[in-house]
Structure formats: C-alpha cells, structure tokens
C-alpha cells in the first residue's frame, strides 16, 4: 500500500547567529515605542480633554450627549446633569454621557 504523501526527512536546524537575543529585545522595545506613540498616547490625550470638558460644564451650556440628544444644561450635580431638551422637558443624564459642548445659540438655529 502506498501513501500519496512521500516521507519527509528531518534536517538539522541552521545555527543561530551569536547576537540573536539582543536584536529580539531591541525589536520588542521599538515595537512597544511605536504602539505607545500610535495608540496609547492619543487615547490618553482624548481622555484628558473629555475630563476637562466634563469639569467645565455649567448651567446654560448647550450640549450633545452620546445618544445624540441635544439640549441646554439646567442643573449640574456631582455625577448627573439635567438637560432641557424642549420647553418643560428635562432629562437627567450622567456627566460622562456628554459628548461635546456646542457654541452658545446653536440650538436656536436647529
């Protein structure tokens, strides 16, 4: 009985160069540095900007939430804010749900 796959003979592995371990460490450091400057640092910058935006919220600011609700801040609490989305219609949302602060008068033009 013959098998369609021919037998494979093992060969000895090629000898590794003497400085192979050091070049691997250098490559890992370069890769980590690239990941830091391309992914970690920009994300930390965005988080810092968002924390500053949340800390600067005040009554009368016009905001847009993550859900797309646009309104005027009516009350600012410790972790929640009250947003007036229409006359006499108020919604309580978490401060972290605020995506952006609009320039004054933006809601009148909508």
Image: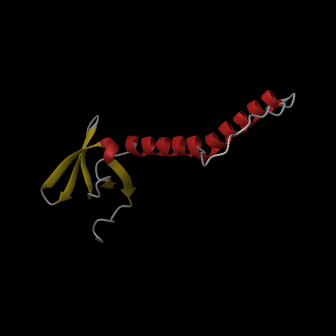
So how many labels did they put on this image?
0
Q: Residue furthest bottom?
A: 109
Q: Position of residue 101 (x, y in %)?
A: 37, 54
Vertical position of residue 24 compared to residue 84: above or below: above
Residue name at image x 26 percent, y 57 percent: 69
Q: Residue furthest left?
A: 88
Q: Position of residue 106 (x, y in %)?
A: 33, 66
Residue name at image x 56 percent, y 46 percent: 42
Quadrant hosting residue 27: top right
Vertical position of residue 3 compared to residue 25: above or below: below
Residue name at image x 38 percent, y 54 percent: 100
**In this orientation, which residue lies closer to the viewer: 83 or 48?**
48
Q: Position of residue 50 (x, y in %)?
A: 44, 45
Q: Residue furthest front?
A: 1
**In this orientation, which residue lies closer to the viewer: 108 or 6?**
6
Residue name at image x 74 percent, y 34 percent: 10
Judged left or right of residue 25, residue 92 is left
**In this orientation, which residue lies closer to the viewer: 97 or 23?**
23
Vertical position of residue 58 compared to residue 77: above or below: below
Judged left or right of residue 33, residue 52 is left
Q: In the picture, which quadrant includes the N terminus?
A: top right
């Amino acid at each position: 009985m013959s098998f369609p796959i021919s037998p494979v003979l093992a060969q000895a592995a090629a000898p590794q160069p003497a400085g192979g371990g050091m070049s691997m460490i250098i490559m890992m450091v370069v890769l980590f540095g690239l990941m830091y400057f391309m992914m970690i640092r920009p994300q930390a910058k965005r988080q810092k900007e968002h924390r500053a935006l949340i800390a600067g919220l005040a009554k009368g600011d016009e905001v847009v939430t993550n859900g797309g609700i646009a309104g005027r801040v009516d009350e600012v609490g410790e972790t929640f804010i009250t947003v007036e989305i229409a006359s006499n219609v108020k919604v309580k949302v978490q401060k972290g749900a605020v995506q952006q602060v609009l320039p004054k008068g933006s809601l009148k033009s909508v």
